[in-house]
């Protein structure tokens, strides 16, 4: 078989725009105060780089990256808002340093630091009362003076000249690797490339602690046992005007841990003899609702509101999913089919998508991952792009019934109903009750559950929730058998009332209550209620943490992002590992190559993509559903499929 080698162009969190023209960087007039630290809020303009921005603000690149963790990838996007730390700000007339007092500082210590007399200080700050002490958070002025080297003012106004490589003296190739900095590289990238800590790199190149890297400068890398030469050279990045281009974020070597399963697919409509004849380069677009601007505005306003601001939930899911993609893509970096992986922040409506389409941003895309919202999916489907779309969060099966080339990474709602019905059919003497809510959507869902139960040979009763209680539930429950109650709505107040009512019945009846997993986030519900009603939820995740592939993924994820992967990260990794080989073998028309009988053993559990009889051509969903029931210690155990069926 032809050896498959893939050069991955992994993006920063959003698409990056490049321009050959030098764009001046204007100092922002917008500032915020956060945890006692003052920042400029700089909005990135086309053609600006992290280096040019840092130089304009006279701040070290590492200080900006430390305050904007998303910049660790080394790339920027137009319109991105970044925080520039302000240590010493110069007044508009250039006569004064504007300084914010930090906790523990005194006027005496600051006068010494700024080499300023008390008389000069109060002349610069006429509104200050000499009888009152300065306090943390105060903005005070110090006169700018011509100072000797090392003074605060010289630090403020300095610019970074290109280094003369004086740090790299006599070469010692036995102890060091000598790396020549290329365009677009950052300290973070280099530490990842050579698998060293930033402190180790700075120790060998002390001046890097106070200035950005410069193109073509040589820096010294301490040689380790596992490093004998520079790793992978970076592929060239296209430099087109007004075109989305991606940048390499990580070139760490990846050992083959067999995370990607290689197999021969059954022919069907897919001819294996024609595989690898569809080109050597493909483009994948990740369309996610990162909502960068909205989150930055929330964070910027938290000082005024005096309430800590959390990252928006849709952002958290999008970032987790994106991070899982990046880690999984590392498995393909040494293969010879080139994948351009572009990521876009598309917001919550169709405004940005419409502009992207009009600007041709999706022209030539071979596979789309996303979007997150059904309205956005519907909009893209209306364009008849004839491009496979992997849907990470949407589960409405009407999408699959009405449109081609839609592939749900999660089970559809139809899949969930069918698997819940199969679970009920395995319980001897089961009494199934489907509870509908007051909305038309809930009533329609309940009717479909009744149908699924009937198809599985289970007789089910439909009851109505009237807003305060489940009507006639007392006469519908049966003693001596398992009563499975399926809830088809999710509102917190209604769920609270249902659980309260079911809880009171557990002394006389065996109850298993099945509902959407999101109800576990409701803080108004006593956790004991979940235990007593044997709360059971459905999921598409079943992770074996003893699996060496899972251990490897967790380790790589933690090393990259300093946190543990969420369920969305596992879903993303399995999607990359499953569909990238199909794309590189069969091109964007890979849908006929999906073998519906094939059960893929993923990092997050089994994946079996199937096409139901009512699905449109080339549309699929992952049919694997797992059910988990809460135990007395508030942990969950998998009850379906049973271990014997796994």
Image: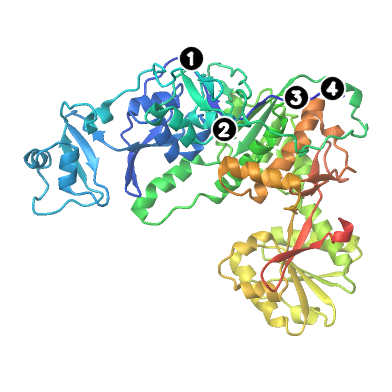
Q: Which residue is mark 4?
A: 2
Q: Earlier in the sequence, mark 2 or mark 3?
A: 3
Judge the density around disc 1: few (<14), some (14-19), many (≥20) Cα neighbours within 10 Å.
few
Quadrant placement of the N terminus: top right
Camera-side mark, 4 or 2:
2
Q: Give how far apart the Cα atoms at labels 1 and 3 are.
A: 31 Å
Q: Are the two marked residues, 2 and 3, in contact with CB atoms closer than 8 angstroms? A: no
Closer to the camera in the image, 552 or 279:
552
Foreground mark, 1 or 4, reads 4
Say which label, 2 or 1, has the lower sequence index: 1
Q: Crowdedness of circle 4 by 10 Å Cα count: few (<14), some, many (20+)?
A: few
The one of 568 and 596 positioned closer to us in this rendering: 568
Report the residue marked by disc 3. Answer: 5
Q: Secondary structure at mark 1?
A: loop
Task: Pick the residue in front: 351 or 342.
Answer: 342
Left or right of residue 314, residue 308 in this image = left
Q: Mark 2 = which residue?
A: 192
Q: Is residue 38 visible?
A: yes
Above or below, comparing residue 470 to residue 322 in the picture? below
Residue 501 % position (x, y): 67, 78
Q: Quick check: marks 4 and 2 in contact, CB under 8 Å?
A: no
């Amino acid at each position: 078989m032809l050896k498959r080698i893939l050069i991955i162009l992994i993006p920063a969190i959003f698409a990056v725009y490049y321009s050959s023209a030098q764009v001046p960087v204007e100092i922002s007039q917008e500032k915020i105060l956060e945890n006692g630290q003052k920042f400029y809020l700089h909005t990135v303009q086309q053609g600006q780089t992290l280096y040019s921005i840092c130089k304009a603000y006279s701040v070290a690149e590492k200080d900006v990256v430390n305050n904007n963790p998303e910049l660790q990838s080394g790339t920027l996007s137009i319109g991105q808002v970044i925080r520039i730390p302000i240590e010493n700000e110069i007044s508009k007339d250039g006569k004064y340093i504007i300084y914010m007092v930090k906790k523990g500082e005194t006027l005496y210590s600051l006068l010494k630091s700024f080499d300023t007399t008390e008389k000069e200080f109060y002349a610069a700050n006429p509104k200050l009362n000499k009888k009152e002490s300065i306090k943390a958070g105060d903005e005070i002025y110090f006169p700018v003076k011509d100072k000797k080297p090392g003074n605060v003012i010289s630090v403020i106004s300095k610019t970074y000249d290109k280094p003369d490589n004086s740090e790299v003296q006599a070469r010692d190739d036995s102890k060091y690797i000598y790396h020549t900095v290329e365009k677009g590289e950052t300290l973070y990238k280099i530490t990842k490339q050579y698998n060293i800590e930033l402190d180790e790199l700075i120790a060998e190149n002390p001046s890097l602690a106070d200035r950005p890297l410069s193109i073509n400068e040589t820096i010294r890398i301490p040689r380790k046992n596992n490093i004998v030469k520079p790793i992978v050279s970076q592929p060239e990045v296209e430099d087109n005007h007004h075109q989305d281009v991606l940048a390499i974020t990580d070139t760490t070597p990846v050992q083959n841990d067999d995370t990607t399963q290689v197999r021969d697919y059954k022919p069907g409509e897919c001819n294996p003899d024609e595989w690898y004849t569809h080109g050597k380069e493909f483009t994948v677009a990740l369309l996610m609702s990162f909502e960068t601007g909205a989150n930055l505005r929330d964070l910027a306003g938290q000082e005024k509101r005096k309430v800590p601001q959390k990252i928006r939930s849709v952002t958290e899911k999008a970032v987790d999913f994106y991070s899982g993609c990046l880690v999984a893509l590392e498995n393909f970096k040494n293969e010879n089919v080139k994948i351009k992986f572009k990521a876009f922040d598309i917001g919550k409506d169709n405004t940005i998508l419409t502009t992207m389409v009009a600007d041709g941003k999706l022209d030539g895309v071979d596979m789309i991952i996303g979007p997150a919202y059904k309205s956005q999916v519907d909009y893209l489907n209306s364009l008849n792009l004839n491009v496979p779309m992997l849907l990470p969060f949407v589960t409405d099966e009407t999408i699959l019934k009405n449109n081609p080339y839609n592939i749900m990474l999660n089970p559809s709602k139809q899949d969930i109903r069918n698997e819940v019905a199969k679970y009920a059919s395995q319980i001897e003497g089961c009494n199934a009750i489907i509870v509908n809510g007051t909305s038309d959507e809930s009533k329609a869902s309940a009717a479909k559950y009744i149908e699924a139960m009937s198809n599985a040979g289970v007789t089910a009763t439909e009851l109505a929730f009237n807003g305060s209680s489940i009507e006639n539930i007392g006469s519908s429950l049966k003693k001596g058998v398992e009563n499975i109650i399926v809830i088809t709505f999710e509102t917190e107040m209604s769920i609270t009332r249902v659980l309260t009512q079911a809880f009171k019945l557990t002394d006389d009846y065996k109850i298993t209550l099945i509902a959407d997993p999101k109800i576990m986030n409701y803080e108004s519900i006593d956790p004991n209620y979940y235990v007593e009603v044997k709360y059971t939820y459905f999921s598409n995740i079943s992770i074996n943490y003893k699996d060496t592939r899972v251990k490897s993924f967790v380790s790589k994820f933690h090393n990259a992002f300093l946190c543990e992967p969420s369920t969305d990260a596992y879903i993303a990794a399995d999607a990359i590992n499953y569909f990238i080989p199909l794309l590189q073998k069969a091109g964007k028309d890979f849908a006929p190559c999906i073998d519906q009988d094939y059960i893929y053993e993923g990092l997050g559990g089994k994946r079996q993509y199937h096409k139901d009889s009512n699905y449109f051509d080339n549309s699929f969903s992952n049919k694997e559903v797992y059910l988990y029931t809460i135990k007395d210690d508030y942990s969950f155990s998998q009850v379906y499929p049973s271990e014997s069926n796994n």
